[in-house]
Amino acid sequence: MYLSLMEVENLRCLHQAELEFHPASNLILGPNGAGKTSLLEAVYLLARGRSFRTRNTERLLAAGSSHLRVLGCLAESPAGTIGVGFSRDEGTEVRIDRRTPGSLAELSLAFPALILDPGIHRLVEEGPSLRRKWLDWGVFHVEQGFVELWSAFSLTLKQRNAALKIGHDPSPWDVELARLGEQLSVARRQALGQLEPHWRRAIDALLGIQVDLVYFQGWSQERSLAESLQHHRAADLERGTTGLGPHRFDVQLTVDRKSARDFLSRGQQKLLGAAMTLSMAGLVTEWTGRSPTLLVDDPAAELDAEKTGRLLAEVRRLQGQLIFTSLDLANASSVQPERLFHVEQGRVRRV
């Protein structure tokens, strides 16, 4: 499965663009500010229903436009076509094979894609939120029923928090929250264990040092979740929210039992974030038989030639579709792109 054709309308500087992608490697060249990253943003919009650069989809609208539209054709996929549109009046609209999906999660199933951008170091540098999304995206693809489990837990948590907010006893929700929460934690822990060989390979290739993934489930390992909820009930009532549980989980990155964030340079953090993404791509490929489309934005940014070469070599090892950007061909020649595009001032042409 791969993205064979994409049409873009009114997304940032791209008023009208059409690209026919190769199933292997595709390179988008152009100067800074020309629209290269916006093209990757359009692909990501098809895969997730949102941008990787902003939470506010309205910011993607081209100047003077009230709506945007991205349409993609998927080859070797039962989904056929996917489309994402946005307007100020009606918000976001999604179609998969001409039908409206029940949730944006269906986009990820229809068209799995991962992004490596210059901000990939934030997976290491920032708090647990991005690492939670990283792991859960993988668990969603390898653990059947995970989305339904996560949705049921989230609804129960919302009900418990609503009771806490008005000072009511939250215990009626504790049994179900604990049951669902323990299952969520097991699924995440199992997926992380399955990720291990892919992680070791990526880390050895990109960094050459040992970095460990340490799973924190969101509550003390000394107690069950039911016991923890009971033990912290008074504190939850005081705060008006549930302070412990699988919604607080993290995947901590350590080097010699020290936080990788404090131990590694910015360049090393970028390679570490890349290892997280590439190892997850490997796991999903192993379990689903479908390689995610990999989006790589300016791989040479903040990396010297030797580190860039290592990164591109590991990217090239993955056999799925690759769509990547570069300022010039010299920085990406080692990937040997099958198809080449040039973008300037929002206009795209095949070279």
Image: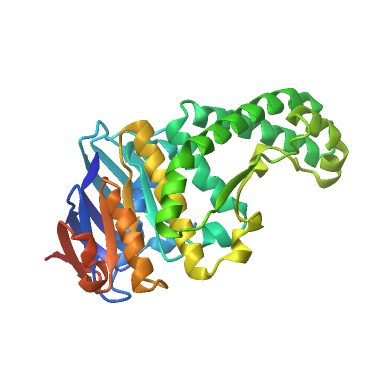
Left or right, residue 121 beside residue 226? left
Residue 31 in sight: yes
Residue 237 image offset from top left, x and y in percent: 84, 40
Name the one closer to the observer, 208 or 324. Answer: 208
> What residue sits 29% from the left and 41% below the top?
82
Left or right, residue 16 beside residue 181? left
On the rendered image, what quadrant is the N terminus found in? top left
Residue 298, image quadrant: bottom left
Whether 266 is drawn above or below 56: the answer is below
Residue 124 image offset from top left, x and y in percent: 55, 59
Residue 247 image offset from top left, x and y in percent: 65, 41
Left or right, residue 54 beside residue 36? right
Whether 278 is drawn above or below 259: the answer is above
Residue 258 image offset from top left, x and y in percent: 66, 58
Residue 65 in sight: no
Whether 106 is drawn above or below 239: the answer is above
Residue extending furthest left? 351
Residue 244, image quadrant: top right
Name the one closer to the observer, 125 or 232. Answer: 125
> What residue sits 41% from the left and 58% below the top?
206
Left or right, residue 109 beside residue 184? left
